[in-house]
Amino acid sequence: RRSSPVPKSPTMKYVVVSGGVVSGLGKGVTISSVGRMLQGCGLRVTSIKIDPYLNVDAGTMSPFEHGEVFVLSDGAESDLDLGNYERFLSIKLTADHNITTGKIYRNVISKERKGDYLGKTVQVVPHITNEIQDWIERVAHVPVDDSGEAADVCLIEVGGTVGDIESSVFFEALRQFQFRVGDDNFCLMFVSLVPVLSEEQKTKPTQHGVRDLRSLGLSPKVIFCRSTQRLEEPPCRKISNFCHVPPANVISVHDVGNVYHVPILLLEQDVHRIIARELKLEAQMEVENPDMKEWTDMAYALDGFEESVQIALIGKYTSLSDAYLSIIKSLKHASIACGRKLDLVWVEGTDLESNDENGEEKTDKADYDAAWEAIRAADGVIVPGGFGNRGFEGKMLAANYCRTSGKPYLGVCLGFQAMVVEFSRNVLKWKDANSAEFDEKCDHPVVIFMPEIDKDNMGGTMRLGARDTKFTHQHEDGSMSTAQILYNGADTVSERHRHRYEVNPDRVDEIHSAGLKFVGRD
């Protein structure tokens, strides 16, 4: 049985964002931008992401299938959009802020097995739809910022597109939910594509998307129009006429220089005033002078950076940038802090290897030469996490090059394994040193499977979530370690983990003494 609900604050307001036509339109960025704008108006916000897939969470999905898995502080493996919410809104979300079909059905079936439904026939309506509504109301009141208070507005993103079979039960739940909470507390927004064909902005996809939404008993109060160009007045009026919204509520969300301009774009089109009016928030919101100066300065400063920093990212999922979204955003934030334009160069790990997958020397060296030229030209190299040994040899070769040439190298997860194995082989001369992930029977397993991890079940069985690391070692002259300096001299830091392997505790001191300094330890 779930824990007791968090005490409710005064009436919660709900802003729901759904999308039509195609997925990947930027609903996550749009709803995050709405939230940042509302924060500028003096409101506290929280976010919920609804993912209609049957998986309990994103933990077992391939990065090619769904992009990266975003790890929350409590260890939840969630959709990458929750990362957008946390970064844009400076909030900390929990496992329950990501609702999936798998979680909902698991809860309902568990209750049925316990007899909680008192012999009733358990059905999609009302039992599944009630579970969804109860979940939303409960989680909306969970504090997510340092104030410790519940939010004023809960932002809800419905994944996928209107009309998908998987999401139909969620839309039915939201149809009922609008009456449960009342019209003054529920604002539905719709994100749609306005393609440009023969230099004309086409509105038919938006009309059809809204028609599908209204057929489900939901009528949007705001329509966000994604397009390469600013929405012109004629298509705006047409959408207004056919989709039952005022022209002022048809919002142009066209391509901009960087995503940080989107909250400013919404503010310029008075979206904050629309929300204040629809949700009866005029008395609580600062609509005349929203505090967005610092955000606006940052967004425009980013466009003006001229000096660049080139970082090579070595991975195995490089054909889908979303697989490394948090890494990319971290690099972007770091480049903003340094006043540099980020030039990110993608390198496939296997391209750094001289032999092909069959162990034979490559005959076509074009990709090989280009990959190594990128490594040599980069100001720094980052090797993020991944699963499986494809490209691992290339990552070790890159680690060796960076160590011997003095080029900055950051190894995360599998990239850290590559550093340890390379150092052990080439400095300690343990020629068979390896990670137990790839060779459990080697004589020098320098990276091992953590003893507390379940080897049989894959989902939610890694070391997950925020854990404290204490800085334990200094430089030999007694000065602070470089890593500790980068953390502003903190004695302890909290970082989020997602891994099954760790450096072999029996080998740590030997490797450390040889020169690969482990200055922070669990």
Image (cartoon, helix red, strand yellow):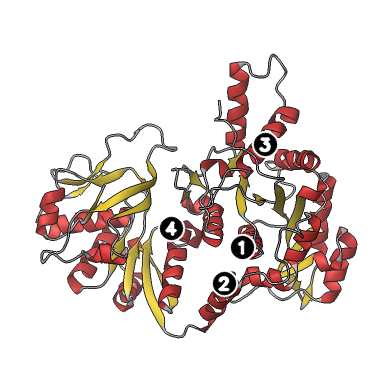
Mark sitting on residue 317 = 4
Real-space CA distance between mark 2 and mark 3, rounded to the nearest whole angstrom: 35 Å
What amino acid is at disc 1?
Arg
Taking 286 as reference, is 439 left or right? left
Residue 326's x, y, as percent?
Answer: 46, 59
Evaluate if marks 1 and 4 touch, with contact meaning CB atoms under 8 Å apart.
Answer: no
Evaluate if marks 4 and 3 touch, with contact meaning CB atoms under 8 Å apart.
Answer: no
Badge 1 crowding class, 10 Å Cα cut-off, few under 14, some 14 to 19, many 20 or more, is many
Task: Please identify, in this view, whether the residue under mark 2 or under mark 3 is nearer the observer.
Answer: 2
Q: Nearer the viewer, residue 283 or 264?
A: 283
Q: Earlier in the sequence, mark 4 or mark 2?
A: 2
Residue 466's x, y, as percent?
Answer: 39, 47
Q: Circle 3 — which element?
A: helix
Disc 1: which residue: 36
Question: In which quadrant will I find the N terminus?
Answer: top right
Real-space CA distance between mark 1 and mark 2, rounded to the nearest whole angstrom: 9 Å
Task: Please identify, in this view, whether the residue under mark 4 or under mark 3 is nearer the observer.
Answer: 3
Question: Based on the displayed image, in which of its 4 quarters is residue 451 positioned?
Answer: top left
Real-space CA distance between mark 3 and mark 1, rounded to the nearest whole angstrom: 26 Å
What amino acid is at disc 2?
Trp
Disc 3: which residue: 132
Evaluate if marks 3 and 1 touch, with contact meaning CB atoms under 8 Å apart.
Answer: no
Residue 49's x, y, as percent?
Answer: 61, 48
Q: Earlier in the sequence, mark 1 or mark 2?
A: 1
Q: Earlier in the sequence, mark 4 or mark 3?
A: 3
Evaluate if marks 1 and 2 touch, with contact meaning CB atoms under 8 Å apart.
Answer: yes
What amino acid is at disc 3?
Ile
Disc 2: which residue: 295
Q: Earlier in the sequence, mark 1 or mark 4?
A: 1
Q: Circle 4 — which element?
A: loop
Q: Circle 1 — which element?
A: helix
